[in-house]
Amino acid sequence: MHPVIRGFHTELEAVYEEKNMSLTEDNSKAMEALDSVLFPHHPYGLQTTLGTQEHLKNPSIVNIENYRANFYVPNNVAICVSGDFDPDTFVATIEKYFGEWKPNPDIKFLEYEPEQAITTPVQKTVYGLDAEFVMMGWRVPGANDYLRSEVGDIVGDILYNGQAGLADLNLIQAQKLNGFYGFNYTRPDYGEFMLVGYPREGQTLDEVRDLMLEQVAKLRSGDFDESLIQSTLNNYKLSNMRQLEDNGRRAMNFVQSFINGHDWKDDALQMQRLEKVTKQQIVDWANEHLGANSYVAVYKRIGEDKNIEKFAAPAITPIETNRDKQSEFLTEIQNTEVAPIEPVFVDFSKDMSKGSVAEGIELLYKKNETNDITTLTNVFDRGNQDDPRLGLAFDYLSYLGTPTRSAEQIKKELYELACFQRLSCGTTQSYIGVSGLDENVGKAMDIVEDLIFNAQADTVILAELKSDIFKTRSDNKLNQGACFGALRRYIFYGPDYIKKATLTNEQVAALTSEELLQAIRDLYGKKHDVLYYGPSDEAAAKKMIAEHHKISEKPESLVRSYPQARQVASSEVFIAPYDANQFYYLQYSDRGDKFNAANDPSVRMYNSYFGSGMGAIVFQEMREARGLAYSASAFLTDLGYKDCDYLFYAFIASQNDNAKDAVEAFDNIINEMPESEKAFEVAKTSLLTGIRTSRTTGIDVLYKYLDLQDYGLTEDREKAVFENVQNMTLADVKAFQEKWIKGRKYVYGFLGKKEGLNMDFVGSLGPVTELTLEEIFGY
């Protein structure tokens, strides 16, 4: 109601950083190019969230105030809540604090010229460092025309739903593209029916475009099975059930309804309307809005973007943060007596139960008291670091059929059942299971396990999959985020771990169908945990699992292994190349301090005060006070298992010319941590409030139990944090920082263009090793 603009010039500096970074984000560039053609007379196409470079050169506080005064008024606001509260008390609270908010009877809402129909295909090209792709779009009705836009949602899911849509089967399953996704993207005034396709090795972008157009033509001609409509509606019902499990998603449904200008009663009746949608309506919609010549295609190619004009941020001086000052309004809020929300910690003896499905197969059971969704997951203590073939094996399996079902039939059956299969592999564990409507989970598990044990090998599919893997690996080396992730993993765990957990291209090429399929089947001969969360009682759940889950008579034990972080005895620097005007930076330290749950309260309090969130020291100093980084964070953490090491990790994303100032400033606040009683109280309250209001429910209870087992613990860690943090002081945090953080030796990592960095400064941090992308990725 009464916002105060502060830190304007340093925040502007950070927005300069953000804008410069967006100029090298290829997805953003493609989207902006697409929207500029689809919506030439509407802000969707005329302006971006960050605005233009010209906008940022001369921003106006007066315009910002005028914008707030026009739109941020009670007759243009909705308060959306979902949770455990008394409605009458809540309404009275709203009236007390917002009742005097003055409306604006003359709100100046957006006026725009209606867009003209596109009658000839439009092609645009953008350039950048990332992998090539084609982004296509058609202008379609917006959400404020919900009777037409929600038909478009069904059309979008018939085309692509991640399982059995036209593009799922004809482009992904058939291995005609290296990647694809598509959906009906609705905004209030207009929507856009969007498709994105990634080429296979040797494939042209024209060929990608044509393949996607073929699938849209099938929508116009009605060349799809009518049963897809009912299957899609079944999955909508499943999705609605999941959304109602979570208060946040419930509240966001209200928010979206308000933004779209809908009456909530109309949104609440959406499923009733959708159930009446016919195939002819879908075909008519596609013919009206997805014309053969009414699309825009953006080709994202690899190359130098000559349209980028980097602009320098204005020279600024750091501002003095006002952490220790407070307004009368804040004082009033802090002095208000509030009935505290009592925390709820997981009691594993009451909130779940343990049993046995068979010898060596433990069942973790929790009843779903909310709806009819069941999730059944088998968890095996073997992951990619134990057998790096597993991830590829699960990918391969998803393309195969059995003697009784083709791969396409498997996808269709699971989608009709409104069930999803989970075949995935993490670093240390693998997961096989299904989730969906309770009545169908047994059938779905039969389908999945039939595939595992009876999959028919196909050497042609495997060869095509290997080709796609090589293409994806090559594309990964073009992506800044992927490169930084690889550099971080290299610095954390070292080159030997990279070799152990990663197959080289030569090793991938040598893999056979039989060894990949056997790697998955071998899991079923091992002891594992079965997680059940559903509406059946425990006896019925055990019966269902016994009937639908194949279990070895004498399963062998698996010993869980964990990645070992490298300890840091002396400072050193690693640089990996990426040709951009921004650098990604990390500093990492492992002194060999072993995990101890007794440290949890101190670690959490330090992280909350120093490195977590917008109120923490890192954000305030690096962004608000100095404007040196768009993104920065720092925290002490552990690797997630008993006797693991504590790691300190810090991260910066900024412009190359800021590197020296940013790193020096970061080092200064890490070692000479600013002290503020007010900031400490805010951090402490935030941490405690988060614990008070968070709830571990549903299948998350079972996963929390497994997480604690990894640590050798049996009690919810949040309980000790809550009890101990209440008595902590800023002096405690300072003492913790002095003991645990100050004076560490670090391994420093830079991802960026060496020529753009101050190498004299980089060399002053420690001995420099230049790495290749092949070294950090392992291929």
Image (cartoon, rainbow, N blue to C red):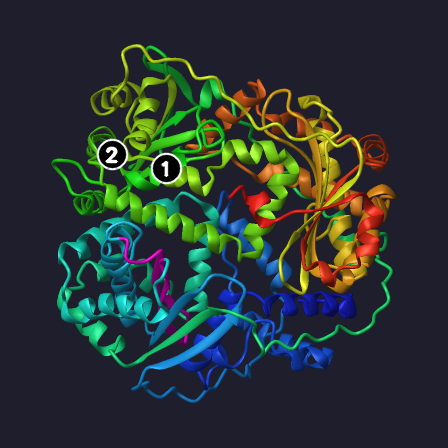
Q: Residues within 10 Å of mark 2 (few under 14, many from 20)?
A: many
Question: Tag 2: residue type?
Answer: Val
Depth check: 660 or 326 in front? 660
Depth check: 55 or 518 in front? 518
Residue 374 seen in the figure = no
Q: Residue at x 19, y 58 (%)?
A: 275
Q: Which residue is mark 1?
A: 510
Residue 10 seen in the figure = yes
Q: Residue at x 44, y 43 (%)?
A: 505
Q: Position of residue 629 (x, y in %)?
A: 73, 59
Q: Which residue is mark 2?
A: 448
Highlighted magenta segment, given as a residue range: 175-200
Q: Position of residue 147 (x, y in %)?
A: 27, 70
Camera-near label (1 vs 2) is: 1
As drawn, is 684 to the left or to the right of 147?
right
Q: Residue at x 56, y 74 (%)?
A: 305
